[in-house]
Image: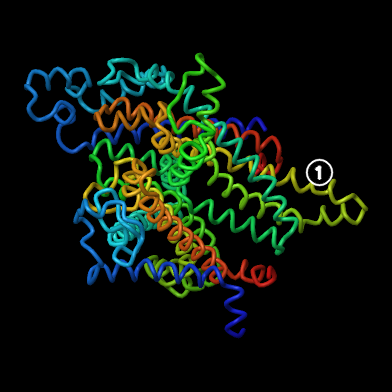
Amino acid sequence: MNRHRWLRHHWNLAAGLVILGLLLGSAGLSFLYVPHDPNRTNIADRFAPPSDRYLLGTDQYGRDLLSRMVVGSRTAIRVGVVAVAIGLGIGLLVGGMAAYSGGWIDEILMRIMDAVAAYPPLLLAILFASILGPGDISGMLAIGVATVPVFARLTRASFLALVESEFVQAARAAGAGTARVICRHLLPNGAAVLLVQATTTFANALLAEAALSYLGLGTQPPHPSWGRMLREAQDFLIFSPYPAVFPGLAIAVTVLGLNLLGDGLRDVLDPKTRSSAARRV
Amino acid sequence: MQAYLVRRAITFVITAWLAASIAFATLLVIPGDPARIILGFDASPEAVAALERQLGLDLPPLVRYGQWLSDLARLDLGTSLVYQMPVGQLIRERLPVTLPLTAMALAIAVAIGVPLGLFAATRRGGAADLLAIAFAQAGIATPSFWLGIFLILIFAVRLRWLPAGGFTPWTQDPERTLLSLILPAVALGASRAASLTRIVRSSALEVLSADFVRTARAKGVPEGRVIRRHVLRNALVAVSTVIALEVGQLLAGAIIIESVFALPGLGALVLNAVSNRDFPLVQGIVICLAAGILVLSLITDVLYAYLDPRIRYS
């Protein structure tokens, strides 16, 4: 397959990688350089439209929007990474244990997962915020916990399917212990599904964090976060739409990129859909 | 069918009990002393002790759990600390805002998502299909509250067609009430419409390549009839399986949208409760919403089993 054909088949993967690269790049760069201090107010320059001095304009306190958005991307990444780590970590453990033990342990664990799944992530986040107080910790924790059932079910299903497979039986017959079977055979083969789910979870965590910050339950001022910026911008819409446009655009483009990345990864990693993806175009 | 219903009813009761227990357990893990957090640090020891008695915090956790569970079984959600009213009553008062909003958003999502997904599937790979996919991807990625802000800017501030927010009670002026729910319902329903488009499209694609569709076409059944009788029906079964999930998303999303449009619904109530640290109220609302989602998924499962005999016997 030459490069052009690869790109045509996997444009979503390429677009997703580019957007994720931009996000990580700008967050990384923000530690070295930002155009303006993201928290410095300058009343003379409030509601400035995009210009050479302020590339994306300024907000109601005259703070530079670009600088605030770039620093805000760190929050987005941190929340996404922590939420995925919690969901994947606990989900792997619970799903693996359920698949391996079977019987009533399996039944109990999966019923608990059903119960957790009854709570939409945002609802769980509100419950946590009422207990731990507002802040990005309760948001990350809640979104992480809310995604545990998804990862647990995926892990359980893929482990159950793999345990029966011939190569795992062969490894067992050759004397491989439980730990070796899990680490060498089950995890690498189940990783594809989990990786795809992780990208989707990252996107959902980002959306949920933005929503929480918008509601005032997430990242607290003066730290910039995309959701919080939108809440503040809403009150001043008539003066300047820019503070409401750009942070929302950042959320939408990032989530879009992550979802495209997830779709693209699924096409590449899952041989069953790979053939149909090739047929599609 | 009967065996399936019994099995499903048992899992429903167990899941509902576990879900409620999760909400109870969160109250136990509040760091520090809940009564002191609620009253503030300069509260007198007598006031703290009185509140602890009111919350039942002076009893051992297991006794409290038993009491709380038996109250819950009688649909008693406790008393709000701030309003000093039964939580159940407070929730009922807010339902005339949140339920119509959710229902309208769901109607919008289904009205757009089902035809668009079906249309895209029948024109697979074409320009219309690509446009539908682009709409679906963009809609899923767009935060509802961001969309809401711009709907306000365009339709309320600039064009002045619809109210920017607020809510007139149904009893006063139903027409105005309906108008004030249109923008919020659109903002809330748009991303669900996008997600339904995707689901309907992929399930319709699956059905379109099924043998019975080929047979129907080979028999000379007109294409429109094939789509209506075979593809749409099967695609709707797929929709019915995700509807509980979608309503769950809508109910949670309503909390944000009510905040954007200043609607006095359940969302406003729960946010108020969070900032007032009114734990029984937060807990009650959260349990109510989770229970609603569980009941809906029970209903859809039973419907699904009724529609599709394969489910009953597995």
> Where's the N terminus of chain A, which quadrant?
bottom right
Where residue B6 sits: x, y (%)? Answer: 58, 30
So how many labels did they put on this image?
1
Q: Residue at x 33, y 32 (%)?
A: B271
SS for callout 1: helix
| Residue receiving disc 1 | B229
Q: In the displayed image of the protein, which residue is found farthest to the right?
A: B220
Where residue B255 sits: x, y (%)? Answer: 41, 35
Q: Is residue A101 visible?
A: no
Badge 1 amino acid: Arg
Q: In the displayed image of the protein, which residue is found farthest to the bottom?
A: A2
Residue closer to the observer: A160 or A249 = A249
Q: Is residue A26 visible?
A: yes
Where residue B61 sits: x, y (%)? Answer: 23, 28
Tell which subunit mark 1 falls on: B
Residue closer to the observer: A160 or B129 = B129
Q: Quadrant of residue A50?
A: bottom left
